[in-house]
Every structure is written in C-alpha cells, then in structure tokens.
Image (spheres, helix red, strand yellow):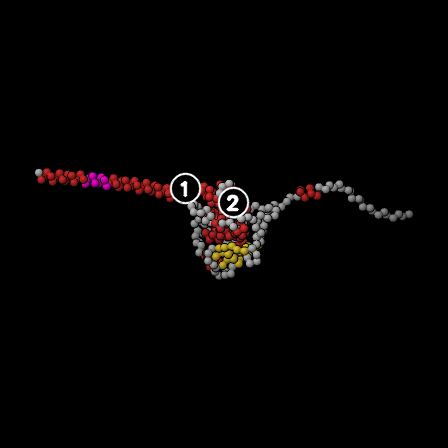
Amino acid sequence: MSTSPSKPTPSPIPDRATSPSSSSNLESSRPHPKPAFPSIKLRLKVPDLNHPAARIFFSNCNPAIALSFAVDSVLATLYQPTRTNSHIPPTRSVTLIFRPMPGVAYTTGSSLDDDHKEIHLSMDYIGGVPSNPPDRQRDEIQGVLVHEMVHCWQWNAVGTAPSGLIEGIADFVRLKAGLSPPHWKKEYGGDWDAGYQHTGYFLEWIENTCGEGSVRKINDRLRGREYIEEDFWKYLFGRDVFELWDEYSRTFDDPSKEERVEEGERVEGDDKVERQEEDDDEMVLVERHDEEQKVVDERVV
C-alpha cells in the first residue's frame, strides 16, 4: 500500500514587536552626511588663443584648478556650510572670460540671470605682469581670480554697502589665500573705506583683534538689510568704525618719522658743530687782527 507524500508547509514568520520610535531610532543611528558647500559649474571662454597673454595664462595655471581654488578660498573664508546653505548667495555658475580689454578685471551677472556670474579678465593686463620672480605671473593670475570670485559670492547690503568695504573684503580674502602681490603694503591715514588692500589690511587687523571669523560676520551682516554705518559696526564690535580705524592707525610705528627726528637731531647737531667752528674761526681772526693792530700801533709809536 502506498501513501502519497505530504506537501511541505512553510514555517510561519514570527511576529516582531515594533514600537513607533523604532524607525526614527534607525534613522538617527545612521551617520548624516557632513554639510558641504554648494558645487557650481565653472566655464572658460578665450576668444583669442593667439594672443600673447593666452600663452602666459595657460603656461601658469590650469583653469579648472585655479577657478576651483578661488571658489574654495572664498567660501571657506566667508561662510560655514550648513545642510541648506541658505545663507550663501545662490550662485549657480561662474564663467571666466579672458579677453583683450582695458583695466584688470571685473565681475558681473550674465545676460541669463544674476545667479550666473561672469569674471572678465584682461589679456592686456596679464600680458604686462613681470615674469620675474618666476611665480609672479602665476600668483597674480590666481590672486585676481580669488578677488573677483569674492564678488560672485559676497553680500552687499542690498546694494547699499560702501564700495570700499566690498573691495576691501575681496582683497582680505586674497590676503588670507596668501596671494598678496609684492607692491601691497600696510598703510594708515585717509579713509577706512578707500578700498582694496588699504581696507583689506584694516579688515585683517579686525580679524586678528576682534576674533577669528570677524570678517565672516561682517559679510553675513550685509545680507538682506541696508547698511547703516553707525548701527552696523556697533552691533558687531561695540564700537563705530572710526574708533576701530583710529585704534588700527595707532598700531603703526612710523619709521619715517623717527628717521626725520633722528635726522633733524643730527642736522641740528651738525649745525651746532659748524656754528662752533665758525665761532672759533672768528675768534682766531679777531685775535690775529688784534695782534696785527698791536704791531702797527707799536710801529707808529
């Protein structure tokens, strides 16, 4: 007698007790990606590859690396990344246009919209940068790119910030990147917002005196509000900008003044010696005149 084999039966899946928080716990246990800066498209346009400056440009830099370095330098100096990066201007692309033109460089929004930026770099200027020392042309190209890249990312108090502050922030970032050209020098006097390296070094002093990240705070304070000078600086540093500028100016030693003082003392001393020598000469002449007069008188007698 044969019997038919029984059909196998699957084992039942055991019930799992789940709590409402289990899925959230699972999510929280996963590592979150570290906030990163936004990535953008970088483009290059060179309308005249036969221009002598084109050879200088391409022999001294890789455009992709140079532009990426400029973006990284600007973002790392002026911002800290967050998950949304909503505090960073919504720049979507930067196009470098290397062409013959007067001046050095300028930055503008593209014809598409203002979120797409254009950096116009002068072939005429780059062609005139000295080749000695060897890294001079490379550093100048990179330095100008960093300066102009700041204008692609910085805030400007909805167009009300002093132009000197805007340009000073750009040169401060260039300073932080180690790309100050040899003709730059710290100086005081004049207006704090004269711009460029004049203001850039002032901002460097603020960064060193008022704490790291001070220029980042200045830039963030220029976001979404108009610039009112007295309120602006007192809110950030408890002092108005003229007090800060005066304090900055007092940090300078004036070697030229010391040289003038020392030179003045030396000249005055030389005058004393010369006057003394003249007086001695006059005394000798008087003595000689008296002796000669005495001889004449004796002969007359």
Q: Residue furthest right?
A: 1
Q: Is residue 40 above or below residue 301?
A: below
Residue located beneath label 2 in the image: 232
Q: Amino acid at mark 1?
A: Asp
Q: Secondary structure at mark 1?
A: loop
Give the residue displayed 46% in from the left and 53% down from the top.
137
Give the residue displayed 22% in from the left and 39% down from the top.
280
- Give the main secondary structure, helix, strand or loop, of the magenta stretch: helix
Which image quarter is the C terminus in?
A: top left
Give percent across and percent down for residue 136: 45, 52
Give percent across and percent down for residue 219: 53, 47
Report the front residue among 193 and 58.
193
Give percent across and percent down for residue 91: 57, 52
Q: Secondary structure at mark 2?
A: helix
Give percent across and percent down for residue 102: 46, 58
Q: Is residue 205 visible?
A: no
Side (left or right) of 227 relative to 287: right
Magenta range: 278-285
The reply to whether dot 1 and dot 2 touch (C-beta < 8 Å) is no
Number of the label disc, if any, that sits on residue 253: 1
Query: Which class describes the residues within 10 Å of circle 1: few (<14), some (14-19), or many (20+)?
Result: few
Tell me the distance, in whole angstroms, between the alpha carbons under discs 1 and 2.
29 Å
Q: Is residue 282 magenta?
A: yes
Q: Sequence order check: which comes first, mark 1 or mark 2?
A: 2
Query: Which class describes the residues within 10 Å of circle 2: few (<14), some (14-19), or many (20+)?
Result: some
Number of the label disc, if any, that sits on residue 63: none
Side (left or right) of 6 relative to 221: right
